[in-house]
Image: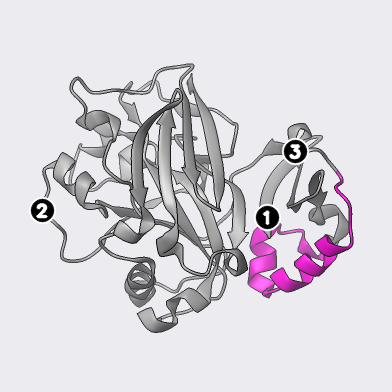
Amino acid sequence: MKLASFLIGGRPTFGCKVTGGLLDLGARLPIYRGGLRRVLELGEIDLVAREAEKAKADYAIADVEFLPLLPNPDKILCVGINYLPHVRETGRDIPDKPVIFTRFAASQTGHDQPLIRPRASHKLDYEGELAVIIGTAGRHISAADALQHVAGYTCFNDGSVRDWQRHSPQFTPGKNFVKSGAMGPWLVTTDEIKDPRELSLKTRLNGVVVQEASVGDLIFDIPTLIEYCSTFTELLPGDVIATGTPGGVGFAKEPPSWLQPGDIVEVEISRVGLLRNSIADE
């Protein structure tokens, strides 16, 4: 099942992809006024799936405005330098432990919405990633049990304002400019993806492939990341873990390739979907 968050007529809601478009589950099932996060908190994805089986589309996909997949997560945890080619292009050492930083909800936008290049800097860069959506809460989750806590997967663009990212060893400023990153359009549930290591990722800039990798090449795989993160914080339904970007980012090119207004960035992950965003100035 593919779930999404979107606006229709200015009203925020969520739904799932069915033949012919999108089913508006927010309108059909008002118990979920908290949106997709509320479904995950109640553990009722199966109930939503049964509703989808017997209904026809309410809207064409072209008629809605996509929101970030999880507009209101408790936390967005991001993993840095988690593919060897990206480690090499940054000039860093291979990390002994996962490198974790956070993004705020307001730093995200949805599919087919513009990423905003801020007034403070023109050094906006792309980072295509697979993100994990937590479905079941947990602390001290073992790697062996980790995938049982996953609701599904989505595409993520960890848009980075590079000079602000490097003001200090802490990445936070460069990763949190408003609407500088994107998430979506779909949460693809785990019944459709048994082993995320089999997924492949591509990032395209104006139609040209600039990043390409197998998720199986992660330095710290998804169960390891869940085990690590759940040790220092409780993972909650709707939490997001962005697993890291492959090599090929713009700052590492000669000369650096910064995103410009009008550019189109696409993050495509096999069996998960395609996240597309244009670039616009603040």
In x, y percent, where is residue 91? 11, 43
Per the model, the C-alpha gap separating discs 3 and 2 is 44 Å
The amino acid on which the numbered mark 2 sits, given as a three-letter code, is Asp
In x, y percent, where is residue 107? 47, 41
Disc on res. 3:
1
Disc 3 vs disc 2: Cβ atoms closer than 8 Å?
no
Q: Say which residue appears at 34% left-offset and 48% top-offset.
A: 213
Q: Mark 1 or mark 3, which has the lower sequence index?
A: 1
In x, y percent, where is residue 211? 34, 38
Question: Which part of the image, by quadrant, shows the N terminus?
Answer: bottom right
Q: Say which residue appears at 27% left-offset and 55% top-offset.
A: 82
Task: Check residue 269 for magenta coloring.
Answer: no
> Which residue in the structure is indicated by mark 2?
93
Disc on res. 169:
none
Q: Mark 3 or mark 2, which has the lower sequence index?
A: 3
Disc on res. 61:
3
Q: Is residue 273 above or below residue 225?
A: above
Majority secondary structure of the magenta segment?
helix
Tag 1 secondary structure: strand
94 relative position to 67: left or right: left
Q: Is residue 59 above or below residue 231?
A: above
273 relative position to 233: left or right: right
The amino acid on which the numbered mark 3 sits, given as a three-letter code, is Ile
Q: Is residue 69 visible?
A: no
The amino acid on which the numbered mark 1 sits, given as a three-letter code, is Leu
179 relative position to 58: left or right: left
